[in-house]
């Protein structure tokens, strides 16, 4: 999900930058996108010119945008930090860009940085909106930083702890990162539940268990739901132990989902809570801001095994042609990386 921030307003272009073009991906109609050229604005003293190396397709959110399924009541809250255009279309949307600072404050020139910026080959952003990519995190893997922030925030919302029995329902990128973080807790018993048996190999590689819905563990201390389906939510509720907590990470857009709150839901005193990355969890909010959380998420990406979450690479100039397949419900991959 995108950060719940307003778009940065950049200064108007002047003659020194007016001839500097950029190419950006726009969602222009339901299930249709295009590469459009634009002129970069004149940077301010604390702005940076970034040449993009990679950007990531945040498949859950961007599929809803691509299909025009962002509810009208969420149009403002769903704005990406540097979004242009308005929901539903046309709109320049995205938040997983990694590039090199070509111009700007001296302490950032030449640095590889992450920014919550749409898919664009060059862009200008304030220096304080950039997160340095450390040397032990490859630029390609750094596109997962926004997803890692979501997973980290989810654990803060859940109150996960050592030796907990933790179940994650839904083996997409968010679910896998949540499970990977959980598996780092000492003594934690972590199981990923997914209908795709192919996820078992990846779960083993990342260091946690796997089960199909029919064999999902019971009596879990904490359950994370990230499948964006009614069946997945039903499984998540069934996995929770007495007074257990189910943390809902799925976002359904304009869709609705049946929540099975009958049966033993009340007698077991279960808790169903939402988690969304736009706001820092209340448990950390007094001490953490978005910049600190972004740096922590980036540092957590220093694990070569996480490269397995990027399952397809696309040349940026092919994005308009390739994205309809990537954003279709039947696409079997995890994250697609745009290569610039």
Image: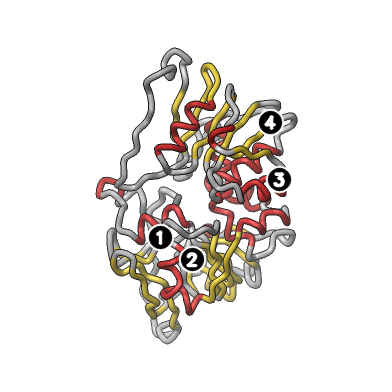
Task: Tell me the CA gap for discs 3 and 2.
Answer: 39 Å
Q: How many marks?
A: 4
Task: Tell me the CA gap for discs 2 and 4.
Answer: 42 Å
Q: Residue at coordinates 74% horizontally, 31% vertically from top-left?
A: 186
Which comes before the other along the chain, label 3 or label 2? 2
Q: Position of residue 36 (x, y in %)?
A: 37, 78
Q: Residue at coordinates 54% horizontally, 33% vertically from top-left?
A: 214
Which comes before the other along the chain, label 3 or label 1? 1
Q: Secondary structure at mark 2?
A: strand
Q: Position of residue 7 (x, y in %)?
A: 38, 58
Q: Secondary structure at mark 4?
A: strand
Q: Quadrant of residue 82?
A: bottom left
Residue position for label 4? 189
Q: Secondary structure at mark 1?
A: loop
Please give the label number shown on residue 125.
2
> Closer to the observer: label 1 or label 4?
4
Q: Quadrant of residue 41?
A: bottom left
The residue lying toward the viewer, choosing from 219 and 37, is 219
The answer to whether residue 300 of the structure is visible from this angle is: no
Q: Secondary structure at mark 3?
A: helix
Task: Tell me the CA gap for discs 4 and 3.
Answer: 13 Å
Residue position for label 3? 204
Which comes before the other along the chain, label 2 or label 4? 2
Label 3: few (<14), some or many (≥20) within 10 Å? few
Q: Are marks 3 and 1 in contact (CB under 8 Å)?
A: no
Label 4: few (<14), some or many (≥20) within 10 Å? some
């Amino acid at each position: 999900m995108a950060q719940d921030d307003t778009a940065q307003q950049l200064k108007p272009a002047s003659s020194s930058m007016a001839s500097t073009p950029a190419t950006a991906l726009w969602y222009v109609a339901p299930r249709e996108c295009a590469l459009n050229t634009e002129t970069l604005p004149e940077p301010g003293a604390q702005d940076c010119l970034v040449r993009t190396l990679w950007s990531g397709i945040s498949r859950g959110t961007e599929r809803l945008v691509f299909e025009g399924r962002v509810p009208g009541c969420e149009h403002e809250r769903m704005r990406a930090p540097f979004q242009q255009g308005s929901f539903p279309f046309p709109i320049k949307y995205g938040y997983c860009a990694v590039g090199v600072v070509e111009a700007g404050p001296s302490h950032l020139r030449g640095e590889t940085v992450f920014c919550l910026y749409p898919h664009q080959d060059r862009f200008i952003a304030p220096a304080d909106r950039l997160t340095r990519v450390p040397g032990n995190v490859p630029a390609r893997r750094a596109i997962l930083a926004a997803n890692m922030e979501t997973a980290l925030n989810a654990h803060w919302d859940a109150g996960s702890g050592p030796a907990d029995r933790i179940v994650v329902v839904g083996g997409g990128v968010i679910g896998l990162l949540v499970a990977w973080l959980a598996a780092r807790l000492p003594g934690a018993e972590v199981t990923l539940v997914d209908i795709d048996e192919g996820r078992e190999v990846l779960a083993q590689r990342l260091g946690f268990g796997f089960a199909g819905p029919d064999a999902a563990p019971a009596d879990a201390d904490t359950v994370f739901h990230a499948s964006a389906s009614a069946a997945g939510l039903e499984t998540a509720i069934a996995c929770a132990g007495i007074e257990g907590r189910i943390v809902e990470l799925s976002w359904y857009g304009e869709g609705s989902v049946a929540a099975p709150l009958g049966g033993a839901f009340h007698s077991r005193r279960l808790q169903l809570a939402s988690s969304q990355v736009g706001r820092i969890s209340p448990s950390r909010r007094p001490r953490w801001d978005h910049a600190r959380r972004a740096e922590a998420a980036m540092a957590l990406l220093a694990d070569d095994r996480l490269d397995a979450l990027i399952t397809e690479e696309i040349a940026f100039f092919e994005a308009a042609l390739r994205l309809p397949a990537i954003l279709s419900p039947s696409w079997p991959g995890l994250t697609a990386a745009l290569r610039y």
